[in-house]
Image (spheres, helix red, strand yellow):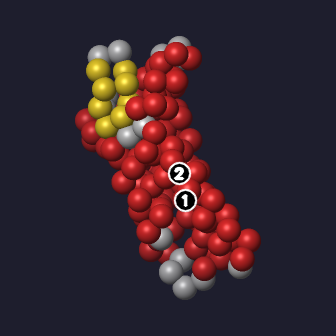
Amino acid sequence: MIGSLKLLGAYLVAIIIAGHGAAPVGLLLLKGSGTAWGIGLLLGWLSVGGVVAATVVCGGNPGRFASLQLAACVNLYVSWIYLAWIAADGRLGLVAAQFIGSAPFQIVFVSTAWKLLREIRRN
């Protein structure tokens, strides 16, 4: 559970670099324009809700808990990729800059996914 909450925190402070500047994803989720970021914002909020819901719903069953947490974490990552792609306007050089700007999120995602996979395998 702590790993998923760390991932959520890293997601919210991950930097997205767009044509008009750079901002953390959390600020983008709160202040982003629905017309410019629409699907990305929807994916972001659904992913945040998924991490919280998996934490609340499955407290007693470790295998199910880890499975739902992993699914929520992967959805969180997919939403970040979508937001990064929109911000970079499809230009690969700017997509690479998104990965550099959010390096802590990338590291926390890999470590959290690895721990959850080990937990699922154990149960």
Residue 38 seen: no
Check disc 2 and report the residue beneath it: 109
Camera-nearest residue between 73 and 112: 112
Image coordinates of residue 9 in percent, x first then y, are 36, 54
Q: Are marks 1 and 2 in contact (CB under 8 Å)?
A: yes
Q: Is residue 65 left or right of residue 18?
A: right
Image coordinates of residue 57 in percent, x first then y, are 50, 75
Q: Is residue 41 left or right of residue 23?
A: right
Residue at the far bottom: name it: 60
Badge number at residue 112: 1
Residue 100 seen: yes
The image quarter containing residue 5 is: bottom left
Q: Amino acid at mark 1?
A: Thr
Image coordinates of residue 49 in percent, x first then y, are 43, 57
Q: Residue at x 27, y 39 (%)?
A: 27
Q: Residue at x 45, y 39 (%)?
A: 103
SS at mark 1?
helix
Q: Where 69 sits versus 87, above or below?
A: below
Quadrant where the C terminus is found in the figure: bottom right
Q: Where 61 sits versus 102, above or below?
A: below
> How dense is the environment of label 2, judged by Cα within 10 Å: few (below 14), some, or many (20 and up)?
many
Q: Amino acid at mark 2?
A: Phe
